Image (spheres, rainbow, N blue to C red):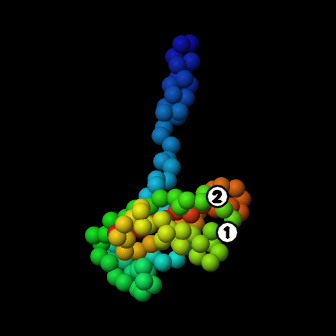
Amino acid sequence: MRIQLLIPGLLLTLISATPLPNPPTDHETPNLETSLLQEPQTKAVILSPDGNMATLGPDMAVKNWQAAGGCKRDWDENRRCLNQCIGEANTRCVGWKSMTGVIQGGCFPGWNTCRCVCEY
């Protein structure tokens, strides 16, 4: 009788101990706006600070952060997200070579945040 009660308890313990998938990390950037196009594992074609296209090697470092301003409805108007990122890069990513503004959902329906991704 004790063995019959022990088996369901053991199965329940094994099921509850199974790890869940990891949440996205700070380095994952879904929903990319424009300005960064990747070519397979060799180089990136980017929009440089002066607006010209440039090619960078794979040895570039990357930083990302959430732009000041928080949850808004108009990050996508007049390149507001990208312009905010460029403004913040002077202190957060000194000497940057490329900048991408990533508009992400998750606040409220129809509201978004802006994540900045720079290469330096």
Q: Amino acid at mark 1?
A: Asp
Please name whichever residue, 9 or 62, is drawn nearer the observer in this view of the structure: 62
Say what secondary structure mark 2 lies in.
loop
Would you say 77 lies left or right of 117 here?
right
**Is the C terminus in the top left, top right, bottom left or bottom right quadrant?**
bottom left
Residue 106 against residue 88 in the figure, above or below: above
Q: Residue at x 45, y 84 (%)?
A: 51
Q: Residue at x 43, y 58 (%)?
A: 27
Residue 75 in the image: state x and y as whole percent.
63, 68
Within 10 Å of disc 1 (Cα), the crowding (few <14, some 14-19, many 20+) is some
Furthest residue in direction bottom, as rendered: 52
For label 1, the residue is 74
Say what secondary structure mark 1 lies in.
loop
Residue 105 against residue 83 in the figure, above or below: above
Q: Residue at x 54, y 73 (%)?
A: 83
Would you say 112 lies left or right of 33 here?
right
Q: Amino acid at mark 2?
A: Cys
Residue 96 in the image: state x and y as whole percent.
37, 71
**Could you say which quadrant of the image residue 8 lies in?**
top right
The dot on residue 71 is 2
The dot on residue 100 is none
**Could you say which quadrant of the image residue 97 lies in?**
bottom left
Marks 2,1: beta carbons within 8 A: no
Residue 41 in the image: state x and y as whole percent.
33, 73
Q: Is residue 56 visible?
A: yes
Q: Residue at x 58, y 76 (%)?
A: 79
Would you say 70 lies left or right of 36 here?
right
Within 10 Å of disc 2 (Cα), the crowding (few <14, some 14-19, many 20+) is some
**Is the N terminus in the top left, top right, bottom left or bottom right quadrant?**
top right
Q: Is residue 105 visible?
A: no
Residue 89 in the image: state x and y as whole percent.
44, 67
Q: CA separation, marks 2 and 1?
A: 9 Å
